[in-house]
Amino acid sequence: HAQDSPLCQKSALKDPSSDLPEMPPCDFIPDKYKGMSKERMMQIRKQNCNPMTMKVTSYKTPAFIHQGHMQWLWDVDGKRYLDLFAGVATVSVGHCHPRVTEAAVDQLKRLWHTTNIYAYPPIHEYTEKLASHLPDPLKVIYLTNSGSEANDLAMLMARLHTGNYDIITFRGSYHGGSPQTMGLTSNSAYKYPIANGLGCTNTMCPDVFRGPWGGSHCRDSPVQTIRDCGCAQGHCMANDQYIGQLKETFATSVPSRIAAFFAEPIQGVGGAVQYPKNYLKEAYKLVRERGGVCIADEVQTGFGRTGGHFWGFQSHDVLPDIVTMAKGIGNGFPMGAVVTTAEIAASFGKGVHFNTFGGNPVACAVGSSVLDVIKEDGTQENSLHVGTYLMTELAKLRDKYEIIGDVRGKGLMIGVEMVKDKASRDPLPPDAMNEIFEDVKDMGVLIGKGGVYGQTFRIKPPMCITMDDANFFIAVFNKSIHDFMERR
């Protein structure tokens, strides 16, 4: 990646002209679409798909996706898009990556399905390989089909092992939508007016941009907040304040003994929120003093996405007791995992738990190939180099435009928080967010949205994107913000 390092790149930031930014070339030729009409698809979507499908559909005119290759997607009309959201941070090494596809096809020809009541090679080959990517004593794996299921299972393991019930998570977190994990998730949009997630308590998120405390060198990111900071070197007042809030939660909202503390190393749906550098280390100590186990939700941050490390928790210099993962684990194939210690895993044996599809032979073949490709293609290193460059360029746009309040993240786990103005840090309203969101899509780039108020653009692409792709997005985003400000 030497030639593609940020130091070798010319900045894409320039005054936007009336011309649309030019998309980088791609030599892949998609198949010509010959299927159902868009009108018929929408008719079926409205009549036969659960209404929730329409509720979560992005864009005024949906993107009718036909085919994918690496970082690119094509719609049914043949229009090409640069995918910077990766099916919600899920496509890790690239759409239809040839080697992952080959591994899936080879396994499909041999054995589609059997369950873990039998011993079959793929599950043993894969779990050994996955365990080799985790530090001791995190070596015992249970395979699942999704992140929600993995987190649900982690809750059960924590409660069985500790003999305690209460679990603490951050406000603004997202850990799944099952009846149990709904309690871990702290965002009203994902809540239903029914009893759910009993025993879950949400504590203040140590958000150094939007929260009450924060400064100019709190977080482990190439880009810091625009907030002033008078802290002495090596001391973080914001961290002390947020740890104080956690202690208050312990004193007022949970019993003296708890089961677990859940945290994403960087919040995903919450808007790529990062915490002060030493927060998790201090929080883990407090949790363990109260009998709890510490759980790292790596569903979005795992598998090299943060660049500097394979797992997000490693950048916090902590060792969790349980790690949950999904999304990028299978490059889009539905799978997940719970990894823990032998001691905690033994507590799970107090009953019988069975999963029909977890550890399916095809899933294991896909997961194993993904691990190989991450190493062979250097996707973790690419995440670091391209992601750092992308954040640095986005920070220039933040300094240029009043409505860009914050740029943050690590590697290719990036958030751009939009505000009415920098002084108030009030969230940019949904209609304004949607206007920019639509413009970016119309210029050929797919990104996501997140945050408690939907105020953060989420950039979490397949980890194969290039510097040219990054420059194209910067030009597109620059033009979309410039045009929005002109219209306003």
Image (cartoon, rainbow, N blue to C red):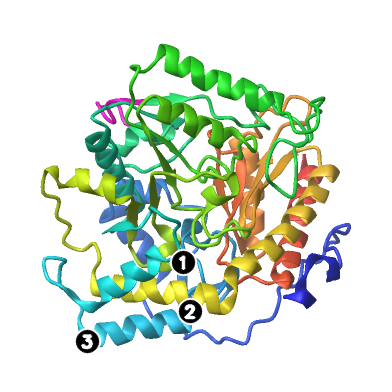
The stretch drawn in magenta includes residue 451: no
Q: Residues within 10 Å of mark 3 (few under 14, many from 20)?
A: few
Percent position of residue 443, x then y: 67, 63
Magenta part of the chain:
191-200
Mark 2 residue element: loop
Mark 3 residue element: helix
Q: Residues within 10 Å of mark 1 (few under 14, many from 20)?
A: some
Percent position of residue 357, x then y: 20, 63
Q: Is residue 348 above or below residue 468?
A: above
The stretch drawn in magenta includes residue 193: yes
> Does the residue at mark 1 contact the one at mark 3 (Cβ under 8 Å)?
no
Q: Amino acid at mark 3?
A: Arg
Residue that appears at 66% across and 40% down: 417
- Of marks 2 and 1, the one in the foreground: 2
Q: Which residue position is annotated with label 2?
A: 97
Nearer the N terminus, badge 1 or badge 3? 1
Q: Which residue position is annotated with label 1?
A: 64
- Of marks 2 and 3, the one in the foreground: 3
Q: Which residue position is annotated with label 3?
A: 110
Q: Amino acid at mark 2?
A: His
Q: Residues within 10 Å of mark 2 (few under 14, many from 20)?
A: some
Residue that appears at 55% across and 59% down: 85
Q: Amino acid at mark 1?
A: Phe
Mark 1 residue element: loop
| Res 463 quadrant in image | bottom right
Predominant SS of the magenta segment: loop
Real-space Cα separation, disc 2 to disc 3, in angstroms: 20 Å
Real-space Cα separation, disc 2 to disc 1, in angstroms: 21 Å
